Image (cartoon, rainbow, N blue to C red):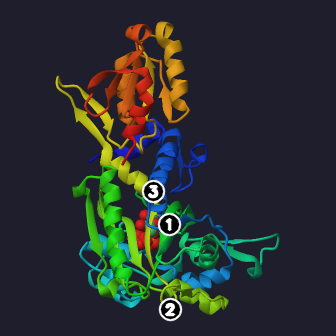
Amino acid sequence: MVTLEYLVQYAKQTGFIFQGSEIYGGLANTWDYGPLGTNLKKNIKEAWLKKFLRQGPNIVGLDSSILLNPLVWQASGHLSGFSDPLIENKTSNQRYRADKLILEHDPNAKPDGWTLEQMYQYIIDNKIKDPVSGTTDWLPIRKFNMMFKTFQGVVEDTANEVYLRPETAQGIFINFKNIQRTTRKKVPFGVAQVGKSFRNEITPGNFIFRTREFEQMELEFFCKPGTEIEWFNWWLEYMKQFLLNLGIKEENLKFEPHAKEALSHYSNATTDIEFKYPWGFDELWGLASRTSFDLTQHQNLSKEDMTYLDPETNERYIPYVVEPAVGVERLALVFLLNGLEEQELPGGDSRQLLRIHPALAPYKAAILPLMKKDHGAKADEIYKKLAENFDVVYDETQNIGKRYRRQDAIGTPFCITVDHQTMEDNTVTVRFRDTMEQIRMDVDKLESFIRESLKF
Ligand code: ATP
């Protein structure tokens, strides 16, 4: 696997990802997605929507607000509890997440279920040093709330305080009744949502792995109490197949069930799907069985009835919920790391290659006239036809070998070359990114050929 530094350089040079606000010296941990990154993110979201919304078991969509009534965050527990343990070094004034500091010291420690005092004691007992100052003089750990606060309206006082959502899930819970009423869905059913979330992370970093602004794809799957573990296992397998079908190597994945004592108080099962990043295995995708916690909390605070009447048994209950939640950028990082390589070729040559499923590739095909003067017009015609249905790119600069390499490097699965023979028999060469094999194909077959390759 390539290093993170290599990937950052690559992403910048190819146009996947640029540093945010670069011309002003940047803004820490913000990233802008260039032409290729935009397509990659769009394709990841489309793939997720296809499998988790359109083809999922009884799923509908939602697009709720980023700004919600602050009572939502009171009910959900985010106002009082959405915090990370912050520890500050007295010499350097650097701040860290105490649990991460402990995990860096010993990856087998399990600080998730510990109290602040237990974490502090561990750091002192093990003489964990501040990576910056090298000292062990730590201030006591305190809780740091990660919600971004802002003001709604023209007066900046506490009455107008609102928060940017730290997750999309609560928008789903507060619309549970609206959705159930308007769709007349019977439990089990689910609600899928894609949208931005914001968290004032203490230690963002590792490129786009952890940022303060990110996009989430969350699904809340409502089911009958008692069936949640069965559904939990079903979704875990579904998530795994999604990743494997899109080309993630199995050896890059690990399933980490949370131990009982590390579970959130409302959860009766949680598993993280982890990926092997350059710094080791770390979270990619979380699956949590959240019981009826969220709907019950909203029922208690809003006084709105959140129960569901089972039309077959006449039972009334608050549904349980199983939640797969993943970040779009986190998946983008994973697909880039999983697929990028520097490949040695016979004869001592090498090429940069991004092996990525055609469904996710920023461009499905590159249309290349062998010679601009003779084949440009025909190539342009093919390009325009394919562009009606697919993201494709046209390239006529430099020799054909260099153009192939450029497309290999950005993951374009097919290069379509228009040459002398095209003018005679309406065929083109189609070159495959991974094998570099070339075949001849009738121009009229290109569309169905590309469409077929996108399936997963
Ligand atoms: P951590 O404990 O590492 O902070 P979490 O367990 O709180 O993460 P969840 O609340 O379960 O994360 O979020 C669901 C998913 O959203 C994560 O698996 C990840 O893919 C994504 N995600 C969460 N926080 C961030 C972030 N700061 N930047 C990018 N993606 C994120």
The nearer-to-camera label among 1 and 3 is 1
Who's the residue at 47% across and 11% down the image? 375
Q: Nearer the viewer, residue 106 or 333?
A: 333
Q: Which residue is mark 1?
A: 59
Q: Which residue is mark 2?
A: 315
* Secondary structure state at the residue bearing disc 3: helix
The nearer-to-camera label among 2 and 3 is 2
Q: Earlier in the sequence, mark 1 or mark 2?
A: 1
* Label 2 environment density (alpha carbons within 10 Å; few <14, some 14–19, many ≥20): few
The nearer-to-camera label among 1 and 2 is 2
Q: Position of residue 230 (x, y in %)?
A: 33, 78
The part of the image, by quadrant, that contains residue 285 is bottom left
* Label 1 environment density (alpha carbons within 10 Å; few <14, some 14–19, many ≥20): some
Q: Is residue 395 left or right of residue 148?
A: left
Any part of residue 179 in sight: yes
Q: Earlier in the sequence, mark 1 or mark 3?
A: 3
Q: Nearer the viewer, residue 125 or 193?
A: 193
Q: Is residue 161 left or right of residue 403?
A: right
Q: Which residue is mark 3?
A: 48
